[in-house]
Image (cartoon, grey):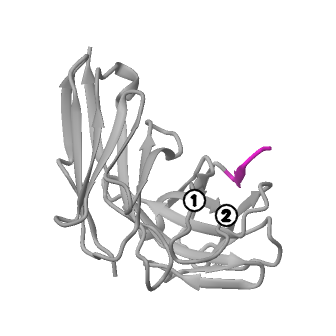
Amino acid sequence: NAGVTQTPKFRILKIGQSMTLQCTQDMNHNYMYWYRQDPGMGLKLIYYSVGAGITDKGEVPNGYNVSRSTTEDFPLRLELAAPSQTSVYFCASNHRTGGSANTGELFFGEGSRLTVL
Amino acid sequence: GENVEQHPSTLSVQEGDSAVIKCTYSDSASNYFPWYKQELGKRPQLIIDIRSNVGEKKDQRIAVTLNKTAKHFSLHITETQPEDSAVYFCAAFPREGNNRLAFGKGNQVVVIP
């Protein structure tokens, strides 16, 4: 298994440009997540999905959009990039069979380093 | 929502000594507490986790203890080695609400050879 694969690994954007970070997983996980990691600030959840066709906002969703048309793919769209979106973005997935007491290891992609100038 | 805090933010230890990182959480209903390790430039990876029905769990040189009354849990690394140098994130999973992990800000652990 390749696990969680993110592309691109690095990208430089100009203010106002748009782009999509791609994320795919081959573990048949139902849950997928997008986090951003700023220096010294830990991991903040942007959006997550509990299954194909279902997405929900996390802590910091403004300026981003997601879709989940298949179990495998969970792209993150940045519209009108701003310097505040300069960060490292991590996609993650896990499998949960239901019930609030049941959660499992989060598998992270290698990250995408985005710089907005 | 759940709020997770980690202390200290940076910890330096001599190789061979022990390191302890403590996390506090706010939601008494949280029932799952993982620790993730992130080496420089790498992705976070799970190293150990504990559920609320257990007080302690050990895996070789690492262990996690949970105090539900005080709402804190700690990561213990014994016989530290240079490869233990990393950022460690704790997290808590709230039983109710948004069904997603709440991460702390991370602790930088530096093992001095």
Whether residue B7 is visible: yes
The residue range painted magenta reads: A1-8
First in sequence: mark 2 vs mark 1: 2
> What label sits on residue A55 in the rendered view?
none
Determine which quarter of the picture holds residue B19. top left
Whether residue A16 is visible: no
Residue A113 lies, in percent from the top left, at 55, 52
Determine which quarter of the picture holds residue B93. bottom left
Residue under mark 1: which chain is it in? A
Residue A13 lies, in percent from the top left, at 58, 62
Q: Nearer the viewer, residue A10 or B47?
A: B47
Inspect the magenta stretch and tell me whether residue A110 lies in it: no
Where A76 sits versus A94, above or below? below
Picture residue at 23% right of the left edge, 44% below the top: B21
Where B81 sits versus A86, above or below? above
Do the residues bearing badges 2 and 1 touch, measured as CB atoms within 8 Å?
yes
Where A89 sits versus A15, above or below? above
Residue type of the residue flagged with mark 1:
Gly
Q: Residues within 10 Å of mark 2 (few under 14, many from 20)?
A: some
Residue under mark 2: which chain is it in? A
Q: Residues within 10 Å of mark 1 (few under 14, many from 20)?
A: some
Q: What residue is pinned by disc 2?
A: A95
Residue type of the residue flagged with mark 2:
His
- Element carrying mark 1: loop
> What label sits on residue A104 in the rendered view?
1
Picture residue at 81% right of the left edge, 78% below the top: A69
> Where is the N terminus of chain A found, in terms of image quarters?
top right
Picture residue at 77% right of the left edge, 79% below the top: A52
**Relative to A112, A61 lies left or right:** left
